Amino acid sequence: MQLYPLFPILHSILKPIFPDCLWEGDRHWKTIALTFDDGPHPQYTPQLLQVLDRYRITANFFWLGACVNRWPAIAKSVCDRKHGIGLHGFEHHNFPMLAPHDLKLSLEKTQAAISRTCNLQPPQVRYVRPPNGLFTPKTLQYLRQWNYITVMWSIVPEDWQRPGITTVVRRVLENVKNGSIIVLHDGDCGGEDVAKITDILLPPLLQQGYQFVTIDTLWQQAKGKKIND
């Protein structure tokens, strides 16, 4: 079942209810964040990095700790390029299904894997995206208590369903705007096409004048806007 038509509706409903999450950046800035979930992957991530290198694009990767442990050299190659790094849990378990202790341990194990591989200390890796975008108010309370920042999305083209490269690209281009957070995948589900999708997607976005930034930059812009409001 494809849920793509529902994501914009969910975004408009959930964003004002859960304002502590980062749903998008400041729309006054022509900046967007290109994000990739579920990696690193031994085949798909290197292919993706070649595309990002060619266009000199800064992206963001929300990693599974188990994958970092399996393919540390690939994780390090992402970090060496100064892409933004975030947490997606140790394995792809929905956060609301985990007991608080297990959720905390999952995130800490992922931070530890990243620290060993990339020499990024836990305070440097504080952005968390819940698998499948699922959370509860209690989940967010725990994440805040543990000093994490929850990162959601504004454009979800549902690439993991493999609707076709052209369809995924069209869905992104039809919805992109200042501050957009675009979600794609470089893991087992959706990663097969991620390099081709990104290669087709980047030229029109660059032609429209968008600057690709880290989630940290979008967060600082959004935080500044809240302070000034």
Image (cartoon, rainbow, N blue to C red):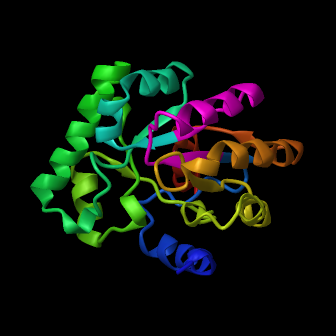
Q: Nearer the viewer, residue 65 or 85?
A: 65
**Relative to 106, does residue 132 appear above or below in the rendering?**
below
Q: Can you give x and y, in whole percent of width and height, for residue 99 in the image? A: 13, 62
In this picture, residue 73 sits left or right of residue 43:
left
> Which residue corresponds to the image point at 70% horizontal and 56% vertical from the top-left?
27
Where residue 54 sits: x, y (%)?
75, 26
Q: Residue at x 36, y 68 (%)?
A: 134
Q: Quadrant of residue 178?
A: bottom right
Q: Is residue 53 magenta?
A: yes
Farthest residue in the right direction? 207
Residue drawn 73% across the image and 53% down it? 28
* Magenta highlight range: 33-60
**Is residue 54 in view?**
yes
Tell me the quarter of the image containing the C terminus: bottom right
Q: Which residue occupies the foreground of this view, 170 or 152? A: 170
Residue 83: quarter of image: top right
Say above or below: 59 vs 165. Answer: above
What percent of the width, then of the height, locates residue 76?
Answer: 44, 22
Q: Residue 189: x percent and y percent?
A: 49, 56
Relative to residue 40, is residue 30 drawn left or right? right
Side of 42 where 7 appears, left or right: right
**Is 223 in front, or is 156?**
156
Residue at 63 percent of width and 63 percent of height: 155
